[in-house]
Image (cartoon, rainbow, N blue to C red):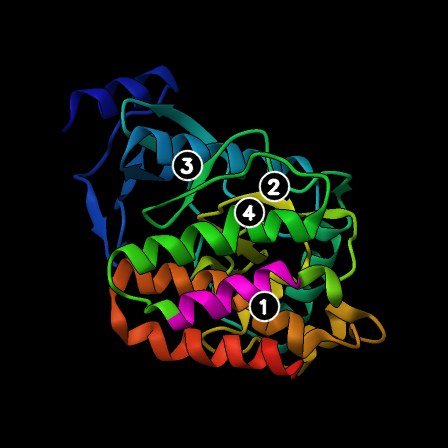
Amino acid sequence: MNQTLAALLEARGLSLQEPLRSLGGGDIATVYWLETSQGPVVAKQDDAERLAGEADGLQALRKTGCSLRVPEVLALGDGWLIMEALESGSRSPRSVVALGEGLRELHSHSAGEHGWPRDNACGRTPQPNAPLADGRAFQRERRLLPLAWACHERGLLDNRLRGRIEALAEALEEWLPDAPASLLHGDLWSGNVLYTPQGPAVIDPAVYRHYPEVDLAMLTLFGSPGEAFFEAYWDGEAQHDWPRREALFQLYPLLNHLLLFGSGYRGGVERAVAAIEQGC
């Protein structure tokens, strides 16, 4: 076993009972399930800065006291993050409602500035979070324009499509009102939601503060949590311009997927841009 991992376990009073078991599904980090003297834990091996950002996000989410389960950070050091292991369960109608209610609780924790005290990462992509007072400026300067330029430089966006993204980024003030910045999970695709016997849990955050629809749009990007989720989350009427906001806040993760995984995501970027331009 890796000496650093052994030292981190020992510092927490944990001793390994069985060999490390690799967990599948991680595109970025290597993840292991460990049976220890105190019960199972999960250990993740990755770039130290990315893991520090993840640990910071997990701790921020836990501090809200919202009803969503969040793994406890047990140890962090030298490219390893050790976390509480969560028992796997199954999705049910009640758990979907609980996810909506819990996410609404999380988003109720808001602040005046959009961003976060530290940068982190969304996948392997560095995510700049230097705070800005205006959410439109944050979406433009910290999200859309940097990724549009990065994709253009790699030949993944032509001049025309990059120009359309720049134009809509510059026009956000024309339709998107400024608002307090909600605490976000930041990368809430369906694979980062777990349904445990104790209720829904969230993992692998890329935390910052911004419009709450960021998390909702990510949940619908590769599927949908279902009508019951939205009824529980909205607890009343949805935003009147939700379809346009959904397209806007899906554009950043689509650009990120284009950057990370290539031209197969260009069509999704084009459709999101067209939906924003047309106002859905």
Instruction: Name the residue: 33% across, 67% down.
Output: 157
Please provide the residue range marked out in magenta: 160-171
Q: Is residue 23 left or right of residue 220?
A: left
Whether 147 is drawn above or below 61: the answer is below
| Residue type indicated by callout 1 | Leu
Q: Report the front residue among 261 and 165.
A: 165
- Give the mark nearer the N terminus: 1 vs 4: 4
Q: Circle 1 sits on which residue?
A: 248
- Give the mark nearer the N terminus: 1 vs 3: 3
Query: In whole angstroms, how far apart are the C-alphas of marks 2 and 4?
Result: 25 Å
Q: Nearer the viewer, mark 2 or mark 3?
A: 2
Task: Give the quarter of the image for residue 64.
Answer: top right
Q: Circle 4 sits on which residue?
A: 141
| Residue type indicated by callout 4 | Glu
Query: In whole angstroms, how far apart are the C-alphas of marks 2 and 1?
Result: 24 Å
Instruction: Name the residue: 44% across, 28% down.
Output: 74
Q: Circle 2 sits on which residue?
A: 61
| Residue type indicated by callout 3 | Met
- Give the mark nearer the N terminus: 2 vs 1: 2
Q: Say the numbered circle drawn on residue 83.
A: 3
- Give the mark nearer the N terminus: 4 vs 3: 3
Contact between labelled residues 3 and 1, with CB atoms less than 8 Å apart: no
Q: Is residue 243 left or right of residue 197?
A: right
Instruction: Say whether residue 190 is visible.
Output: no
Task: Give the quarter of the image for residue 148.
Answer: bottom left
Query: In whole angstroms, how far apart are the C-alphas of marks 1 and 4?
Result: 14 Å
- Give the mark nearer the N terminus: 2 vs 3: 2
Instruction: Say whether residue 228 is visible.
Output: yes
Query: In whole angstroms, how far apart are the C-alphas of marks 2 and 3?
Result: 14 Å
Instruction: Name the residue: 38% across, 54% down.
Output: 149
